[in-house]
Image (cartoon, rainbow, N blue to C red):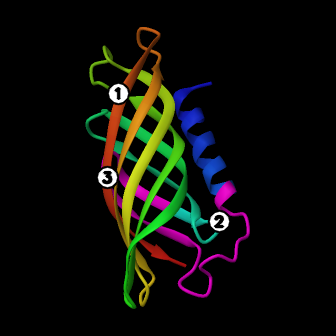
């Protein structure tokens, strides 16, 4: 399977999963959020609440340190509310997911494909009066690399904002 096809397959699977019905958060601001993530990767960020404390998120964008196109999806738990005010909540979250990176090192020497597991944790500034959230997260990635038929470790750092429908 080509690298682009695998990336598109993972993206389509994430969107199909996000299309499943849910009633969580519907009375507050909606269950589906779309926005931007800056960091590793930089691009489009999506989140879909499955329940009050579980969600699926994903992103697709340019990996500047990874030098390529990155797609990832995570299953998240929001077990702790660190702060709760009438205007916002500050939950911490963690989760497990997968990442696909089509690395283009430039010049063809370092081009290869990576696929692996993501272990993510973060903080979410969840506005209650407007349909927005702001997040910051860090993820460790253990992946298989086609170059050299090897395994490796990476880190993803990101921050972003999403609007909920």
Provide the residue designation for mark 2. 50
In which quarter of the view is residue 160 placed? bottom left
Image: magenta residue range: 17-46
Closer to the chain start, of discs 2 and 3, is 2
Q: Nearer the viewer, residue 70 or 125?
A: 125
Q: Alpha-carbon neighbours of circle 2 within 10 Å: few (<14), some, or many (≥20)?
A: many
The answer for how far apart the CA atoms under marks 1 and 2 are is 35 Å
Tell me the residue at 44%/86% (across/down).
Answer: 128
The answer for how far apart the CA atoms under marks 2 and 3 are is 22 Å
In the image: residue 15, left or right of residue 37: right
Closer to the chain start, of discs 1 and 2, is 2
Label 3 sits on a secondary structure element that is strand
Q: Alpha-carbon neighbours of circle 1 within 10 Å: few (<14), some, or many (≥20)?
A: some
Q: In which quarter of the image is the C terminus?
A: bottom right
Tell me the residue at 64%/60% (across/down).
Answer: 18
Q: Are marks 1 and 2 in contact (CB under 8 Å)?
A: no
In the image: residue 6, left or right of residue 80: right
Camera-side mark, 1 or 2:
2
Q: Nearer the viewer, residue 61 or 85?
A: 85
Provide the residue designation for mark 3. 158
């Amino acid at each position: 399977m080509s690298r682009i096809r695998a990336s598109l397959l993972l993206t389509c699977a994430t969107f199909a999963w996000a299309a499943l019905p849910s009633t969580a958060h519907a009375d507050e601001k909606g269950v589906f959020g779309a926005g931007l993530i800056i960091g590793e990767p930089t691009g489009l960020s999506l989140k879909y609440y499955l329940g009050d404390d579980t969600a699926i998120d994903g992103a697709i964008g340019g990996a500047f340190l990874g030098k390529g196109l990155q797609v990832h999806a995570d299953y998240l738990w929001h077990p702790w509310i660190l702060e709760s005010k009438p205007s916002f909540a500050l939950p911490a979250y963690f989760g497990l997911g997968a990442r696909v990176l089509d690395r283009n090192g430039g010049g063809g020497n370092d081009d290869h494909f990576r696929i692996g597991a993501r272990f993510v944790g973060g903080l979410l500034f969840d506005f209650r009066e407007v349909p927005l959230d702001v997040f910051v997260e860090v993820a460790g990635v253990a992946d298989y690399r086609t170059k050299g038929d090897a395994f490796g470790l990476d880190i993803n750092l990101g921050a972003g904002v999403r609007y909920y429908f």
